[in-house]
Structure formats: structure tokens, C-alpha cells
């Protein structure tokens, strides 16, 4: 790695970590990386359980940026940056935020498969959970995961998400109906955990 690459973080005037982790940082989304977002949205391996069943064009993705609402909204997302490799590897966030009842859906996508199964999704989700409970004052996080997506529900269970039940035939993946596991994490349960 060259000196220039090593100091990319410092040199890049558009690198703004919002939440610092150990191996990753969570940063605001940036339209400059729209090509990477598109690559992940269309990658057959990545999109399989993320349920991106329609191709996403670069133009469409750019348009989404133009209409994006920053600030308190029903959707908050972050870029996941690998600190050591200084590489953008995925996205994480909260959707369907219900500010009245204090709950939201948690989502995660590590778009670069080389970084799967290295505990990075778990670290990113831990940071998101802490942010949701201690900064946004949310009370409950939930998520639905295909039973076949072992990586995804393993992340949920490692952090303490509790299974709430199974929804039968909730997704149609590769020509067959797949059940989803429904998970929840309450703030009161998370506060009791020693590994948070
Ligand atoms: C699902 C996803 C977010 C997981 O992220 P990740 O960084 O790989 O997760 P982690 O490494 O923190 O944890 C994954 C765990 O699942 C386990 N796992 C993954 N596939 C497995 C398999 N086939 N059998 C057994 N365990 C498996 C890993 O061993 C790891 O557990 P461990 O730490 O106890 O060894 C990532 O694979 C991804 O983004 N996939 C594509 C998009 C997607 O499916 N998003 C979720 C939609 S709900």
C-alpha cells in the first residue's frame, strides 16, 4: 500500500465518520459512491436475500439521492467503512421508523462478499443498536430474515435479538417460497446485556 493510500481517510475531504467502531466506522451516505451502491444492488450474491428483484439503474440511484430527505425521517442509513482497508464495504440503517411508538426496522448489507463471516456485520449492528437506543431514544428494533439466510439471523442472535415467530412463505427466492424469522430487540433487554 502506498503512503497516499494509507492516508486516504485524512486526505479525503468527504470522509465524515459519524460513529466510530473498532474495525469499522459508520458514515453518512455519499452520492460520490453511487456506482458502488449500484454494484451491490445488482450483485446476484448480495441481492438474493436483500430481495432486490428488479435491476436498479445508475440513473434511478442518482435520482434517489436527489430526493433524499436528510434529518429526522422514517429512514436513516449509513455507509460501513472498513478502517484498516479504508474501503466502503456496505450499508446499514433503520427503516420504517415509528417515532410515536419508538420502534424501527433494522437492515444491513455488507456489499463486498470478501468481508462476510468476519464479524463485521455484527460489529456494525451493535453500533446501530447503541445509536438507536441511546441517541434516538427508540425502544424496540425489529427485523425479518429469510430462514435460509444463516449469516443474517446469526448476526441478530449474537446481539440478543429474540425470535418472535416464523412467517410462512413470506419471500419467493430462486423459484420457491421461503419462510422468514421475525426478530425483536427491546431496549430493556439490551441494557441487561454485558457484551453491549
Ligand atoms: C447477512 C450479512 C449482513 C452478514 O454479515 P457478516 O458480516 O457476514 O456477519 P458476521 O460475520 O458478523 O456473522 C455471520 C455469522 O453467520 C455465520 N454463518 C454464515 N453463513 C453460515 C452458514 N451457511 N452456516 C453456518 N453459519 C453461517 C458465520 O459463521 C457468522 O457466525 P460466527 O461469528 O459465529 O462465526 C452479509 O452476509 C450480507 O450483507 N449479505 C448480503 C445481503 C443480505 O442478505 N442482507 C440481509 C438481508 S435481511
Image: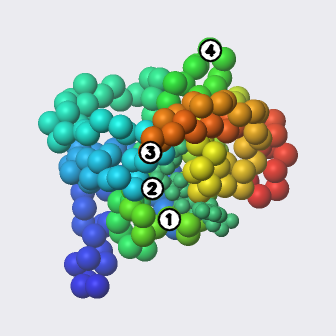
Q: Residue 19, how many percent across, how many down?
A: 50, 51
Image quarter where the N terminus lies is bottom left
Q: Residue 145, how many percent across, how many down?
A: 60, 41
Label 4, label 1: how far apart the Cα atoms are: 35 Å
Q: Is residue 45 above or below residue 177?
A: below
Of labels 2 and 3, the one closer to you: 3
Query: Residue under circle 4?
Result: 100
- Is mark 4 in CB contact (under 8 Å) with mark 1? no
- Is mark 2 in CB contact (under 8 Å) with mark 1? yes
Residue at screen point 33% across, 25% down: 69
Image quarter where the C terminus lies is bottom right
Q: Counting other residues with Cα less than 10 Å from the Cα at mark 1, is it few (<14), some (14-19), or many (20 or more)?
A: some
Of labels 4 and 1, the one closer to you: 1
Residue at disc 4, secondary structure: loop
Label 4, label 3: how far apart the Cα atoms are: 38 Å
Label 2, label 3: how far apart the Cα atoms are: 21 Å
Query: Residue under circle 1?
Result: 116
Q: Please indicate whether residue 27 sits to the left or right of residue 182 in the image.
A: left
Q: Residue 120, how many percent across, how many down?
A: 54, 62
Query: Residue under circle 3?
Result: 174
Could you tell which of marks 4 and 2 lies nearer the N-terminus? 4
Residue at disc 2, secondary structure: strand
Residue at screen point 57% across, 51% down: 149
Could you tell which of marks 2 and 1 lies nearer the N-terminus? 2
Residue at disc 1, secondary structure: loop
- Is mark 4 in CB contact (under 8 Å) with mark 3? no
Ligand 1 near label 2 (Cβ, under 8 Å)?
A: yes
Q: Counting other residues with Cα less than 10 Å from the Cα at mark 4, is it few (<14), some (14-19), or many (20 or more)?
A: few
Could you tell which of marks 4 and 1 lies nearer the N-terminus? 4
Amino acid at each position: 500500500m502506498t503512503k497516499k493510500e494509507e492516508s486516504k481517510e485524512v486526505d479525503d475531504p468527504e470522509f465524515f465518520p459519524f460513529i466510530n467502531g473498532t474495525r469499522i466506522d459508520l458514515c453518512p451516505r455519499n452520492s460520490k459512491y453511487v456506482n458502488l451502491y449500484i454494484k451491490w444492488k445488482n450483485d446476484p450474491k448480495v441481492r438474493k436475500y436483500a430481495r432486490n428483484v428488479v435491476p436498479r439503474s445508475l440513473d434511478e440511484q442518482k435520482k434517489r439521492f436527489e430526493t433524499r430527505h436528510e434529518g429526522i425521517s422514517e429512514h436513516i442509513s449509513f455507509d460501513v467503512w472498513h478502517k484498516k482497508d479504508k474501503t466502503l464495504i456496505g450499508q446499514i440503517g433503520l427503516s420504517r421508523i415509528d417515532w410515536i411508538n419508538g420502534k424501527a426496522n433494522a437492515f444491513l448489507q455488507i456489499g463486498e462478499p470478501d468481508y462476510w463471516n468476519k464479524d463485521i456485520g455484527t460489529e456494525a449492528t451493535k453500533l446501530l443498536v447503541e445509536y438507536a437506543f441511546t441517541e434516538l431514544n427508540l425502544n424496540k428494533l425489529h427485523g425479518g430474515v429469510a430462514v435460509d439466510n444463516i449469516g443474517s439471523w446469526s448476526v441478530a442472535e449474537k446481539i440478543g435479538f429474540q425470535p418472535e415467530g416464523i412467517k410462512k412463505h413470506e419471500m419467493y427466492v430462486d423459484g420457491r417460497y421461503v419462510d422468514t424469522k421475525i426478530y425483536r430487540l427491546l431496549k430493556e433487554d439490551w441494557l441487561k446485556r454485558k457484551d453491549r
